[in-house]
Image: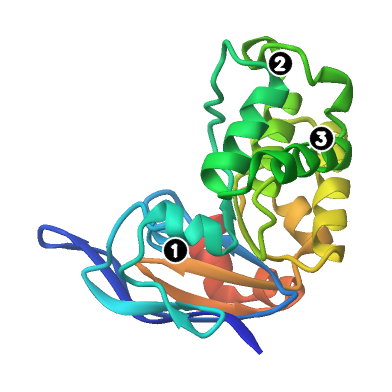
Amino acid sequence: MSILVADSLSRSFGAVNVIDRLDLRLDAGEILGIIGPNGAGKTTFFNLIAGVMRPSGGSICFEGRDITGLATWDRCRLGIGRTYQVPKPYAHMSVYENVLVAAVHGGGLPLRDAHNEVEGALDLTGLSHAHAIPSGQLTLLDLKRLELCRALSIRPRLLLLDEIAGGLTDAESHVLLDIIRHVHARGAAIIWIEHVIHALRRLATRLVVLYSGNFVVDGTPEEVLADARAKSIYLGE
């Protein structure tokens, strides 16, 4: 069953079509990796799914419900969580407070339930030890963990990951991959934009190449990375 359906999704800025009649079916339990050159429309696509931008045309359905006109917070409360490529926490608030804000104001949870979700998310992401530390003092790895933690606090059924492994060492990336694997095992579907290809190879069940506002190659990671069009577009071969 498809958890997310984008039908002829489009977004233009003036005369420039950044997303151009894009179709997508994401099944429950999938980990869909998205690769593509800079400017291909990857972040715009996430903004459309999350509700940060409204499409110029087309529709988006989540779990059978048309969410094309819903606000960002309504989508969040339906179970769409998101991380950002550049973490922007409330720097002077503690790790715990940052996640609590997400659970209450993003997830719409009552305070008692929110505290329980925060504790569970901190434990899952390995941040329990840092719960009282101001987020502005975190390392890059822990900032990435905090991004994940905030998204997990809303109990997402769809998780949008935006270059979560970017800037990390291989060892640090493996820490995040283990967390993502556990999140997926709990039932969340994932769409993951990433330039760290070895990370996608390890976890993605499906890979697509986004180019000029549409998906031009779609298949398993092995199929896509061996495809001549993907190599030409993404690797410059």
Residue under the image location 71 percent in, 16 percent down: 138
Query: Residue flagged by tag 3: what amino acid is it?
Result: Leu
Secondary element type, mark 3: helix
Task: Please tell me in which quadrant of the rendered image residue 13 appears.
Answer: bottom left
Kind of residue at badge 1: Ile
Q: Nearer the observer, disc 1 or disc 3?
A: 3
For the point 57% across and 56% down, which residue is it?
235
Q: Give the residue type that dot 2 points to.
A: Leu
Q: Position of residue 62 (x, y in %)?
A: 51, 76
Q: Determine whether, in the image, residue 162 is placed left or right of residue 156.
A: left
Which residue is at the front of the view, 191 or 182? 182
Among the two numbered marks 1 and 3 on one chain, the one whose residue lies closer to the N terminus: 1
Q: Which disc is residue 138 wearing?
A: 2
Callout 1 secondary element: helix
**91 sits to left or right of 16:** right
Q: Nearer the viewer, residue 121 or 179?
A: 121
Residue at which label 1 appears? 49
**How packed is label 1: few (under 14 Cα within 10 Å), some, or many (20 or more)?**
many
Residue in view at x 74 percent, y 34 percent: 145
Residue, disc 3: 122
Q: Say if residue 84 shows up in the picture.
A: no
Q: What percent of the width, then of the height, locates residue 105? A: 52, 41
Quadrant housing the C terminus: bottom right
Residue 122 vs residue 184, the one in the foreground:
122
Label located before the other in sequence (2 or 3): 3
